[in-house]
Image (cartoon, grey):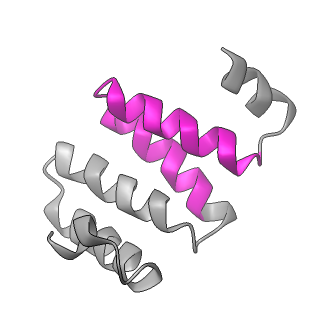
Amino acid sequence: PLLEQVIAREPSNIDALYHLGVIASALANATQARDYFSRVLTLNPQHANSHHNLATAYLQDDERSLALTHFKMALALEPNNQTAAHM
C-alpha cells in the first residue's frame, strides 16, 4: 500500500511505478505489470529496465513480437544487458 499511496500523491513517480510493476510481475500479474511499466515508459522512454521488464511481461502472455521489440529497446539503451541480448 505504501507505493500505491505514493502514486496517489505523485502519479508521475517513476520509481514507485517501476517498483509496482516489479511487484506485479513477481505476483504473475502480467497485465498489471505491463500497465505500470508502460506508464514508466510514457514518462521516460529511455528507462531500459522498464523496457526489459515489459518485454518479460509480454512473454508471460505469449506476445512474442511485442516482447522482442522491448528487449531490443532495452538492449539499445544498455548494450551490456546480457539478459536482453539472449532473447
State the image coordinates of residue 23 (x, y, percent, origin top left): 45, 29
Count how many numbered circles sit on residues in the image: 0
Residue 72, above or below 1: below
Picture quadrant where residue 45 is located: bottom right
Residue 56, above or below 80: above
Picture quadrant where residue 2 is located: top right
**Of the pair 41 and 76, the residue shown nearer to us:** 76
Residue 67, above or below 35: below
Residue 66 horizontal side relative to residue 13, left or right: left
- The residue located at (13%, 50%) in the rendering is 62
- The residue located at (25%, 63%) in the rendering is 67
Confirm whether the magenta stretch covers residue 81: no
Picture quadrant where residue 29 is located: top left
> Which residue sits furthest top?
1
Magenta stretch: give its range: 12-41
State the image coordinates of residue 1 (x, y, percent, origin top left): 66, 14
Residue 40 horizontal side relative to residue 50, left or right: right
State the image coordinates of residue 59 (x, y, percent, origin top left): 19, 52
Helix, strand or loop for the magenta stretch, by majority: helix
State the image coordinates of residue 40 (x, y, percent, origin top left): 60, 55
Give the position of the C terminus as an image quadrant: bottom left
Residue 36 horizontal side relative to residue 42, left or right: left
Residue 19 horizontal side relative to residue 58, left or right: right
- The residue located at (67%, 46%) in the rendering is 15
> Which residue sits furthest right?
9
Residue 1, above or below 21: above
